[in-house]
Amino acid sequence: MESARGALMGRFLDCNYNDREVVKDIVLTKFNKFSEIKAHKVTIELHSLEDQVRISLYRKEEPLCFFAFTAFPNNFTIAVSTSTFVYPRFRNLGVGTALQKVKKKVCKALDIQMLLATVNVTNESEIHILKKHGWKIAGRTNTVYLFSKTIKTK
Ligand SMILES: CC(C)(COP(=O)(O)OP(=O)(O)OC[C@H]1O[C@@H](n2cnc3c(N)ncnc32)[C@H](O)[C@@H]1OP(=O)(O)O)[C@@H](O)C(=O)NCCC(=O)NCCS
């Protein structure tokens, strides 16, 4: 049975100020330890809509990367990871890899037990990162792979 916390978080932080702050802390703590970035403190913007939380990171004033989780319809233990983007200037420095660790932590905080994501079959770097971080291919169409990852809650 879905936990009360899962159901609450399924509405993605709209009604719970403390959980917003927990997520911000997790993301910033992870990123400010990250060696390429740590000399320049990273700041965060967190937008939450009815079914989506979107997190954007900045190095000083400059946009660094963003990602979003969308709640899976009627099952808040699953989220769809969408819109992962590292600004070109910061690519191949390990930011995309760091985002994997951040996402895992955020999932644990929000009681999300499975992530889904679609990736274009030509997107070699993202496919490489996902496979390296325990994502499995769950299916494919002509143009995209559907990946899934189980998040260990204990
Ligand atoms: C995909 C993306 C998020 C990766 O971010 P990043 O910060 O450059 O990633 P990292 O630096 O952490 O890691 C890149 C990895 O891909 C590998 N890589 C790069 N080009 C590659 C290629 N052509 N084939 C295979 N692996 C490749 C690198 O070697 C590195 O792996 P390693 O750490 O094992 O050496 C970024 O390129 C991006 O924002 N792309 C545009 C948006 C996008 O495609 N988002 C994903 C949507 S599903």
Image (spheres, rainbow, N blue to C red):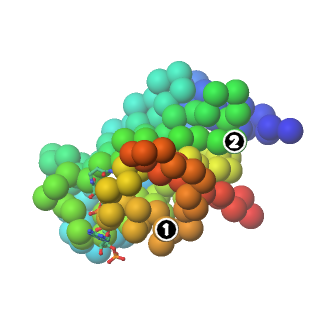
Residue at x 40% of width, y 68% of height: 128
Q: Quadrant of the C terminus?
A: bottom right
The foreground one among 23 and 133 is 133
Decide if residue 129 is on the left or right side of residue 135: left
Q: Secondary structure at mark 1?
A: helix
Alpha carbon separation for disc pair 2 and 1: 22 Å
Let me know if residue 62 appears in the view: yes
Residue 147: % across, % down: 53, 53
Looking at the image, the residue that sits furthest to the right is 1
135 versus 63 height, above or below: below
Decide if residue 97 is on the left or right side of residue 75: left
Disc 2 target residue:
77
Residue 30: % across, % down: 42, 63
The foreground one among 39 and 111 is 111
Disc 1 target residue:
131
Residue 116: % across, % down: 56, 47
Which picture quadrant has residue 137? bottom right
The amino acid at mark 1 is: Lys
Residue at x 19% of width, y 61% of height: 90
How many numbered discs? 2
- Disc 2 or 1, which lies upstream in sequence? 2
Decide if residue 81 is on the left or right side of residue 77: left
The amino acid at mark 2 is: Thr
